[in-house]
Amino acid sequence: MSLDAATATTTQVISKLAATFARFGVPEELVSDNGPQFTSAEFGRFSREFDFVHTTSSPHYAQSNGHAERAVQIAKGILKQSNPLLTLMVYRSTPNASTGFSPAELLMGRKIRTTLPTLSTNLDPSWPDREEMRSSDATAKLKQAFYYNRRNGVRDLPPLDSGDRVLMKLDNERQWTTPGTVLGNCSTPRSYAVVTPEGGCYRRNRRHVLQVPGAPTNPAADTSPEDPTPVQSSDVTPSSAGESPTNTGTVTVTRSGRVIKPPPKLDL
């Protein structure tokens, strides 16, 4: 399926998808970005007619649509080769590190014949074990997520509730300057609908939303601490009758109330 994403219309996208569904069947779920071709009412009717769930990724957050981004990266690498078709055949016949099976095996239930010598018995149809494949894929993804989170210091942000005051910004913006109010969660994880004072409604990933903390309950207590009372030397008494005070001058006290004790000097 080849279309120009910048100029493709909803009708063209539906036509290509219908042809793909006729060849391989209708998927249970289709994941896309938020292009106008996929968010239109016409595409919504198409998804209901063909009975599949349409899920969109978070706007301005390509990482939430990792499968598509990885597919684009692989396709670009194939097109850079001197013989793209031969490279494509090699890719389709190479077992994936996560699943343990090649794309051809997962699609057709058999290995495809390539330019490499192989036994004819290796080309016999044999469907992969789905449970084994899914378990291997899940284990690989958990391992990748663990090392990525540890390397980048990833942590889960606290969830937001309806009515929370927030500030918004995108990854290419430097400051949190756009105020808004959370309307509620969207259908996808970590995605929220936010309305601005001007009335605009935006869908943003949790990464692009900063919760505004509430005002302190007693601001005066936080901004106006009591001044410490100076301590005179007459208030300081020796710990025992046989000891004499080490400092007969005025004791210096910091703003926080800590008494500054000068270091003892050697009496030479």
Image (spheres, grey):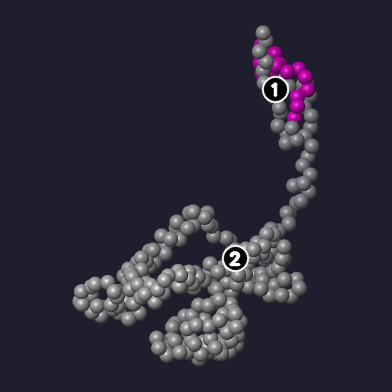
In the rendered structure, does residue 241 fall within the stretch colored magenta?
yes
* Amino acid type of the residue that numbered disc 1 sits on in the rendered structure: Pro
Residue toward you, 212 or 39:
39
Query: Which stretch appears magenta?
Result: 238-253
Dot 2: few (<14), some (14–19), or many (≥20) neighbours within 10 Å? some
Disc 1 marks which residue?
262
Q: Kindly state the secondary structure of the residue where label 2 is placed.
A: helix
Query: Which residue sits furthest front?
Result: 82
Q: Is residue 52 left or right of residue 90?
A: right
Identify the residue at horizontal 60%, vertical 80% (top origin). Answer: 6
- Residue 98 is situated, as x and y percent measured from the top left of the image, at 37, 66
Residue 238, visible in the rendered structure = yes
Q: Kindly state the secondary structure of the residue where label 1 is placed.
A: loop
Q: Quadrant of residue 173?
A: bottom right
- Residue 86 is situated, as x and y percent measured from the top left of the image, at 37, 75
Identify the residue at horizontal 60%, vertical 65% (top origin). Answer: 206
Q: Main secondary structure of the magenta part?
A: loop
Disc 2 marks which residue?
206
- The numbered mark at residue 212 is none
In the rendered structure, does residue 94 fall within the stretch colored magenta?
no
Dot 1: few (<14), some (14–19), or many (≥20) neighbours within 10 Å? few
Q: Quadrant of residue 179?
A: bottom right
* Amino acid type of the residue that numbered disc 2 sits on in the rendered structure: Arg
Residue 135, visible in the rendered structure = no
- Residue 69 is situated, as x and y percent measured from the top left of the image, at 50, 70
Choose the circle earlier in sequence order: 1 or 2. 2
- The image shows residue 109, relative to residue 45, as above or below, that is above
Q: Is residue 123 left or right of residue 263?
A: left
Residue toward you, 231 or 264:
264
